Image: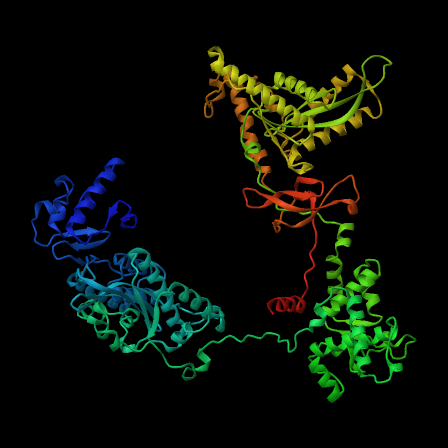
Amino acid sequence: MGKDFYMDDLLTGTNTAEEGQALIQQLLQLTQSAGLQLRKWASNSKEILQAVPENLRNERTLLDIEPSSLVKTLGLQWDTHADEFRFEVPQHGNSLPITKRIVLSDIARLFDPLGLVGPVVVQAKLFMQELWREGKAWDDELNDSAQRKWIEFRDNLEGLGKLSVPRWVTATSSVVSLELHGFCDASTHAYGACIYVRAVSTNGDIFTNLLTAKSKVAPLGNSMRNPTVCLPRLELSAALLLSHLFEKVESSVNLQVKCFFWTDSTIVYYWLSSSPSRWKTFVANRVSEIQQLTARGIWGHVPGLENPADVVSRGMSPEELKDFTAWWNGPDWLRQPSRFWPSISAPVHHELPPDQLEERSIALPVQLLPPNELFLLYSSFTKLLRISALIRRFIHNLKSRDREERRNGPITTAELREATENLVRIAQEERFTQDFKDISGDGQVKKNSRLKALSPLIANDILRVGGRLRNAPVTYNQRHPMILPDRHPLTELILRFYHLNLLHAGPQLMTAAVRERFWPLRVRNLARQVVHSCIKCFRCKPEVMEQLMGELPSERVTPTFPFLRTGVDYCGPFHYRPIQRGTPVKCYIAIFVCLVTKAAHVECVTDLSSQAFIAALRRFVARRGRPELIECDNALNFRGAKRELDELTRLFETQQHQHLVTSSCANDGIAFKFIPPRSPNFGGLWEAAVKSLKKHLRSTLGNVILYLDSFLTLITQIESCLNSRPLTQLSADPNDLEVLTPGHFLVHRPLVAVPEPSLEGIPMNRLDRWQQTQEYVRRIWKQWQTDYLSGLQPRTRWTQRRDNVKLDTMVLLKDENLPPLKWRLGRVTQIFRGDDNNIRVVTVRTKDGEFRRSITKICVLPTYQPSGDLASSANLQEGN
């Protein structure tokens, strides 16, 4: 029912009069409960209208003056007696001369939401497109020929008044089968689509009626960047238009019926019968969308002369359209059994023009031989080499008849050298098959070979670098190193062997060492990959995770009284002398920072106990007012203070319930919010205040130890300095005498402020002294909103979104007090997503327990990912 409402108009229907009367009663009760009233009821059934109060019916229905009363609904005229739709002929008058603006105004009067007179409307669209092609301005007068043509079109519109379309498309109440048939077609000027309803009654009668249609003009294509679209592509666009039209009908009708789609283009039919990946981008994108939208329907090929969509792509006058049965009821075979329909097939692809198929040329590298399974058995080159040497010894001993020729004892250097050459030979035969053939035949590789710059040669069935060092006084392996293919398992094993053998050497040293015997292709990239995937190298120089800087919380950007939302932190220790020549005493400083105004409040704390912090908090509340939220880190004294404050709060609440005298008192509870442990970036506001406080103390005191009263005086003066820091950029205008500071928000503010009305817009000379003070405070907050708040918009760090850490990821837990090699190894067991779906806090389980940390305190360990064919070969082994 919700889909039947459009704004305040309702168009719906039922199968029987009883259902209609019940529906009316339900609608009236539903709308009246909301204080609404549905009026101007009209129906093609007098029985249904009897359920509607007379004051709510349509006036024509009440008077019943005309036998065929017309009711206008959503721009269409509905004859309730004949149950037909009629079309209102637009009145144009004598608007001369005719311009493009007038043509557009005339077209806008042709209201046809269902596309029932689409062949008439498309003529107007083509006329307007022709004016665009000629470059006519909006108020340029058309030439005589164009004016006569448009006036003739206007006159022909009188024929729309003679058209009548049945509202009920099934034409019978006893339907046993219902189908939707869609047709699409295109011409060089326009393309369109139409959908018909085919209903079969219980006695075998077949009824077909037009349901909806839509048309579009073809693109102009008057430039090199926007060339004219060829006819097959226009036919494909018509099929896409039909798919979108069907999607709209399917969502509106909400019936599970059989669907058939027809096109007279053999090329389009063949495109839709194949995978989208075969075609070029234009065709592939549209074929993919069409196949998705019409997945539950069947596409067929219809001869062009029997396609009713042909008329909507070319246009027709109202007089001709009125008697054109193929448009209103579809082709003749649609009203016959399915055995008389066109065959659901089209000419095979070899009958189509090859240049019009637009088939995509796909080139993929083909690996003739998969990597040998031997390379996947071990992850150590040393173990693989020794196993290969033992296998070769076993084969040699089987072939040897003389016992003296058999090999025994430890593996020799010669056997390891032969095993190495054999492994390299196997890898080269897998990758350089064509190069072996070219060198054996012509003595050199082809011009497009990757080995061309190496001038390769074959020695003992092994490809070696020819190079230019033949006369150098170096070993044979250095003059002619063995070539290793890139992205091969053997190459990776050899480089990992050199990396470990050279005590975790870097890429440059590893490359220099391996080239004394081997010549891997693209060795620098592979060497860097080996170093980056080494766990021990990573642990020596770990990289912490980062994520896009998060959004500011509401407590930072919502204007409130100063210190209503506060952050707190400790710094120290510091020393003072309680008496003259007395022993210095250790103390700490608790600094409270307003999260909104950055105002600071400094308190001296005797020790790190919870009682000392509670005492400092009470002094802060007495001077600045009670906060509703305190944010801090996870220090033990803060945790203990929270527990004690919670107990006091519960006690106070209990007294409130026990004593009616205190029932009107406010709740003294203070909410605590803790940031993740060891994550100072989550409390950057108070960390910056601590940094500034320490800077002032170091610059002022140095190594001097003050008496207690002098120390308290000094930190109070430092508090004043912190509250005088500018919040916004200093203005270059000499007329601006002051800049916004936290101190502005601490003046004229009592501990319990009474809400004051806004005095904005009242001249200052009409305000008394108190109102002038309040207006001054309001202007301060206005400046805070316009200058300071906008300055918080840009992200100064972590400006790019990174991949989120996943569960069960192995990480290192960063500890500033330990060297990286002693950082604890753990696994991510819990993740916490922010409002932007990014992860910035995780829980890590280690051997010492679970710890909640910011991602800036963890380092994700690299995982060894076999590159190239090694990974595919491993997957192949798992599949086998």
Whole-percent x, y for residue 201 in the image? 18, 65
Whole-percent x, y for residue 231 in the image? 39, 75
Question: Relative to residue 566, is residue 705 drawn left or right?
Answer: right
Please state which of residues 670 and 650 is positioned toward the viewer in this rendering.
Answer: 650
Question: Relative to residue 625, is residue 456 drawn left or right?
Answer: right
Q: Residue furthest top?
A: 661
Whole-percent x, y for residue 671 in the image? 57, 26
Residue 481: quadrant of the picture: bottom right
Whole-percent x, y for residue 156 in the image? 20, 66
User: Is residue 134 among what the camera can see?
Assistant: no
Q: Residue furthest right?
A: 473
Please state which of residues 424 and 618 is positioned toward the viewer in this rendering.
Answer: 424
Residue 89: quadrant of the picture: bottom left
Q: Considering only vertical position in the picture, is 645 above or below 430?
A: above
Q: Residue at x 73, y 31 (%)?
A: 691
Residue 271: quadrant of the picture: bottom left
Please state which of residues 318 and 77 is positioned toward the viewer in this rendering.
Answer: 77
Q: Residue at x 63, y 17 (%)?
A: 623
Please state which of residues 496 and 554 is positioned toward the viewer in this rendering.
Answer: 496
Q: Quadrant of the C terminus?
A: bottom right
Question: Relative to residue 232, is residue 116 drawn left or right?
Answer: left
